[in-house]
Amino acid sequence: MAKEKAMKELQKEVDEYISQFKEGYFSPLAMLARLTEELGELAREINHYYGEKPKKSTETEKAIEEELGDLLFVLICLANSLQIDLEEAHDLVMNKFRTRDKNRWTRKTQEDRSV
């Protein structure tokens, strides 16, 4: 089983990988295009597994896990290129949800949680 990695470690690992190439990170707009492309590929896989569009016999088998990994890689590249710490970004978003949306959804009771 692979060792669990914190987001900072993931960002560092991607940065070390990209840093070995002269080209470095793509521009933010190019990465946004790649992010959109990868999201489309993920959507296609989810549609094949859970939607009404089965794969053609000529289409290769890709896993949702692989498509999520591709999406995560490009997202980390974009964050790194813009010097954004994704752990900090995550904390900002979670704080927003915990405050702005704290009463938006129906909370589970203790009984619901034990089921």
Image (tube, rainbow, N blue to C red):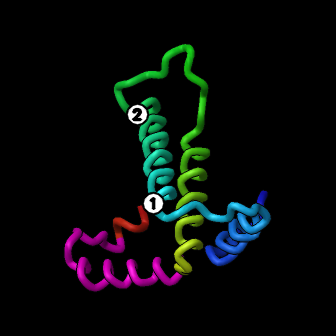
Residue interval drawn in magenta:
86-110
Classified by dominant secondary structure, the portion drawn in magenta counts as helix
Q: Earlier in the sequence, mark 2 or mark 1?
A: 1
Could you say which disc has been placed on residue 91 in the image? Answer: none
For the residue marked with disc 1, what is the amino acid?
Leu
On the image, the x and y values in percent for residue 46 come to: 44, 38
The residue most toward the left is 104
Which quadrant of the rendered structure holds the N terminus?
A: bottom right
The residue most toward the front is 22
Marks 2,1: beta carbons within 8 A: no
Q: Residue at x 59, y 65 (%)?
A: 77
Q: Secondary structure at mark 1?
A: helix
Which quadrant of the rendered structure holds the C terminus?
A: bottom left
Location of mark 1 (residue) = 29
For the residue marked with disc 2, what is the amino acid?
Asn
Q: Residue at x 48, y 43 (%)?
A: 42
Up-down: is 92 above or below 106? below
Location of mark 2 (residue) = 47
Q: Residue at x 54, y 50 (%)?
A: 68
Q: Residues within 10 Å of mark 2 (few under 14, many from 20)?
A: some
